Amino acid sequence: MAYPKPLERLIRAFERFPGVGRRTAERLAFHVLRDRESTELADAIGEAIRGTTRCSVCCNVSEGDPCAICSDPERESDRLLVVEGPRDVEAVERSGAWHGRYHVLMGALNPADGTQERHLAVGELVRRVRSGGVREVLLATDPDAEGEATALFVLESLDHAGAKVRVSRLARGLPAGSALEYLHRGVLEDAIEGRVTLRDGETG
């Protein structure tokens, strides 16, 4: 017997979440039907969608455009920390180790889950750098295979565009295969302070 159409639609919606298969989607859907607070969940999802936007400068998720960090005159606008997602921005901000600004790629190269070059905000980064005023780009993608491939793609894109900017990478003291958002504050501070230059802006 097939599920009612509204329930099937809900299941398929859950299946679109990363790492959620059919059975997990079904369990989530039935939990929503049993939960008396499910309307609160629906309202929260709607509010999150309606109340957030993408910053036109750094591509991060924010309530306003530009976001609070891009609007902050105290931040060093000539240094950009390039990260995979908004959670990485939060992790670095908690560490207090970075006083520049950010650029959020909204993902990492991963053919397995369908994330390709065209899905990343690399073109926006190139345009931002070429517009002037940026002297350093610090690549802070995760120290795993996808993060390394993404960092290389960003570097090649900047080179291809002829961007004369210093490009650095977080220090190799980061645990291999780890995710930036889970790293301890001290580890992030050391990685930022010990960053490695991949290319000098004068010789790019």
Image (cartoon, helix red, strand yellow):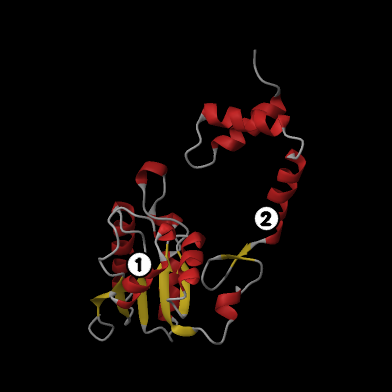
Residue situated furthest top in the rendering: 1
* 2 and 1 marks in contact (CB < 8 Å): no
Label 2 or label 1, whichever lies nearer to me, is 1
Foreground pick, 116 / 185:
185
Q: Residue 9, can we see it?
A: no
User: Would you name the residue on which mark 1 appears?
Assistant: 187
Q: Amino acid at mark 1?
A: Val
Residue 148 in the image, given as x and y percentages of width and height:
29, 59
Task: Give the numbered dot on residue 48.
Answer: 2
Crowding around mark 2 (Cα neighbors within 10 Å: few <14, some 14 to 19, many 20+) is: few
Foreground pick, 112 / 157:
112
Quarter of the figure with the C terminus: bottom left
Q: In screen coordinates, is 202 left or right of 122?
A: left
Q: Residue at x 53, y 28 (%)?
A: 22
Residue 62 in the image, given as x and y percentages of width and height:
61, 66
Residue 153 in the image, given as x and y percentages of width and height:
31, 62
Foreground pick, 29 / 193:
193
User: How many numbered marks are there?
Assistant: 2
Crowding around mark 1 (Cα neighbors within 10 Å: few <14, some 14 to 19, many 20+) is: some
